[in-house]
């Protein structure tokens, strides 16, 4: 397969390097991004030759021209969620398969919903091409864990808690592990979860629980809305409740509250000395690049799904999870674990597409595809996963 990777950030670096390690699958690898120097740095890290170019993927015509030149069978979009629709348009125009790791986001309002991308279903079907949405870790591996549980571990799934812990330490007072704009938009929106057939909302970061994370231990975790909830509600049968939890340190929350209080996380433009600036975009300029955190990062991520339901008439509670070590990732690819856990699943999915194990026409969320070959490939590509039986009470309430 020939592949075009768009986006030379933390995740793009991992995708390019992992593709370059799987030369039996990926023949021609081309990396394009807005800043050429970032592509050059990644090109130097790759163990085999890749080609690069500058591209502004907001410009559909430029992306079409590049696709026509490279003639890939797959475009992996690891730029920002703002580019999703423009890149999908370019794939439609050229008849090339598409994959991303995050849902489309309009610039002016935080939504985290799939409606815009699901609207491409008929056009992708008519063109005979496949779009795979959200093939990172969460969304991505977490969706596949749910699909695996539905296929092999349960007759009925009643409740899912997706639990995401980054127990790493990068030594900075405040930094985000992936693109700051997207990360801060995600955290500052109202929390939302699905229960008894309807969405319920809570104030941002107002609900927390202590979760026992494998290889990490007990951590305070906050209820957030996360995009995979929307597709899992549709694809996991009989679901009564699904929630998403993420850990944040007290210092991180304190910084965020101050930034919010002074208006630095706003996404509407403000007038500044005769210029319009978006405070959150300016904040991104000041914060460390997520990829720059890797060098000093220690500790682990521990992310998984706690799933409750019934099998053979018996109640059951299991956790499917992966633990990933920041320092190991840095040693292997020069990146931190958040970039690694995003990039590796995308490459595992791309390998399945190349082998014809993930096939289809139209727009798919990953839980609609066969989880078995994906989870086998994920372990092979560096993210081993585990299942453990749980007792009641792993999500204990805190005052
Ligand atoms: P980064 O900010 O590190 O990288 C994004 C890259 O995209 C940068 O190189 C940037 O270029 C490039 N880019 C931005 N705009 C354009 C454009 N118009 N045309 C071409 N290239 C562009 O982000 P990450 O690598 O951390 O994240 C990449 C994606 O992965 C994001 O969509 C993020 O939401 C998603 N993600 C998914 C996760 C999951 O588990 N599913 C977890 C973490 C991230 P420049 O350097 O010039 O700004």
Image: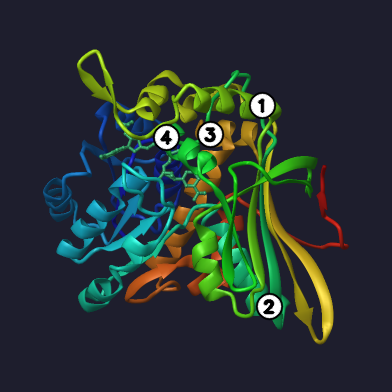
Using the numbered discs, state the Cα–Cα distance from disc 1 to disc 4 in whole angstroms.
21 Å
Which residue does the numbered mark 4 point to in the structure image? Answer: 181
Earlier along the polypeptide chain: callout 2 or callout 4? 2
Instruction: Say above or below: 230 vs 49.
Output: below
- Marks 2 and 4: which is nearer the front? 4
Mark 3 Cβ and ligand 1 under 8 Å apart: yes
Q: Residues within 10 Å of mark 2 (few under 14, many from 20)?
A: few
- Marks 1 and 4: which is nearer the front? 4
Percent coordinates x, y for residue 356 in the rendering: 40, 73
Q: Residues within 10 Å of mark 3 (few under 14, many from 20)?
A: many
Looking at the image, residue 57 sits to the left or right of residue 300; the answer is: left
Q: Residues within 10 Å of mark 4 (few under 14, many from 20)?
A: many
Image-quadrant location for residue 297 = top right
Percent coordinates x, y for residue 184 in the rendering: 49, 36
Mark seen at residue 169? 1
Quarter of the rendered structure image containing ligand 1? top left
Using the numbered discs, state the Cα–Cα distance from disc 2 to disc 1 in whole angstroms.
36 Å
Report if residue 179 is visible in the image.
yes
Looking at the image, residue 128 sits to the left or right of residue 217; the answer is: left
Mark seen at residue 177? 3
Which residue does the numbered mark 2 point to in the structure image? Answer: 152
What residue is rendered at 20% in x and 16% in y? Answer: 274
Earlier along the polypeptide chain: callout 3 or callout 2? 2
Secondary structure beneath disc 3?
Answer: loop
Using the numbered discs, state the Cα–Cα distance from disc 3 to disc 2 in whole angstroms.
33 Å
Residue located farthest toward the top when viewing the structure as drawn: 273
Using the numbered discs, state the Cα–Cα distance from disc 4 to disc 3 in whole angstroms.
11 Å
Earlier along the polypeptide chain: callout 3 or callout 1? 1
Residues marked 3 and 1 touching at CB (< 8 Å) = no
Using the numbered discs, state the Cα–Cα distance from disc 3 to disc 1 in whole angstroms.
11 Å
Return the residue nearer the eye: 315 or 13: 315
Percent coordinates x, y for residue 29 in the rendering: 31, 48
């Amino acid at each position: 397969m020939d592949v075009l990777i768009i986006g030379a950030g933390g995740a793009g670096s991992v995708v390019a390097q992992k593709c370059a390690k799987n030369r039996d699958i990926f023949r021609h690898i081309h990396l394009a991004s807005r800043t050429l120097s970032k592509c050059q740095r990644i090109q130097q890290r790759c163990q085999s030759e890749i080609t690069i170019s500058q591209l502004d993927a907001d410009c559909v015509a430029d992306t079409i021209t590049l696709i026509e030149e490279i003639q890939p069978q797959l475009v992996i979009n690891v730029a920002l969620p703002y580019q999703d629709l423009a890149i999908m348009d370019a794939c439609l125009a050229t008849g090339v398969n598409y994959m991303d790791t995050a849902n489309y986001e309009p610039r002016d309002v935080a939504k985290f919903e799939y409606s815009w991308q699901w609207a491409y279903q008929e056009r992708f079907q008519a063109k005979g091409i496949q779009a795979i949405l959200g093939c990172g870790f969460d969304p991505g591996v977490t969706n596949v864990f749910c699909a695996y549980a539905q296929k092999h571990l349960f007759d009925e799934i009643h409740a899912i808690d997706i639990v995401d812990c980054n127990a790493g330490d990068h030594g900075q007072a405040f930094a985000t592990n992936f693109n700051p704009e997207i990360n801060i938009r995600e955290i500052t929106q109202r929390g939302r979860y699905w229960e008894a057939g309807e969405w319920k909302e809570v104030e941002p970061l107002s609900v927390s629980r202590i979760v026992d994370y494998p290889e990490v231990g007990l951590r305070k975790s906050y209820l957030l809305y996360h995009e995979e909830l929307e597709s899992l509600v549709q694809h996991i049968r009989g679901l009564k409740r699904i929630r998403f939890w993420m850990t944040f340190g007290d210092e991180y929350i304190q910084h965020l509250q101050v930034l919010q209080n002074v208006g630095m996380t706003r996404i509407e433009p403000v007038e500044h000395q005769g210029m319009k600036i978006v405070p959150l975009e300016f904040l991104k300029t000041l914060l460390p690049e997520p990829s720059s955190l890797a060098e000093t990062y220690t500790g682990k991520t521990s992310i998984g799904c706690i799933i409750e339901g019934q099998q053979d008439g018996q109640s059951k509670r299991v956790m499917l999870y992966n633990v990933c070590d920041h320092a190991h990732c840095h040693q292997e690819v020069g990146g931190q674990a958040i970039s690694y856990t995003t990039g590796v699943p995308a490459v595992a999915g791309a390998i399945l597409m190349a082998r014809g194990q993930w096939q289809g026409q139209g727009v798919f969320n990953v839980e609609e595809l066969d989880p078995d070959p994906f989870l086998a490939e994920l372990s092979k590509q560096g993210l081993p996963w585990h299942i453990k039986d749980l007792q009641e009470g792993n999500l204990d309430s805190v005052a």
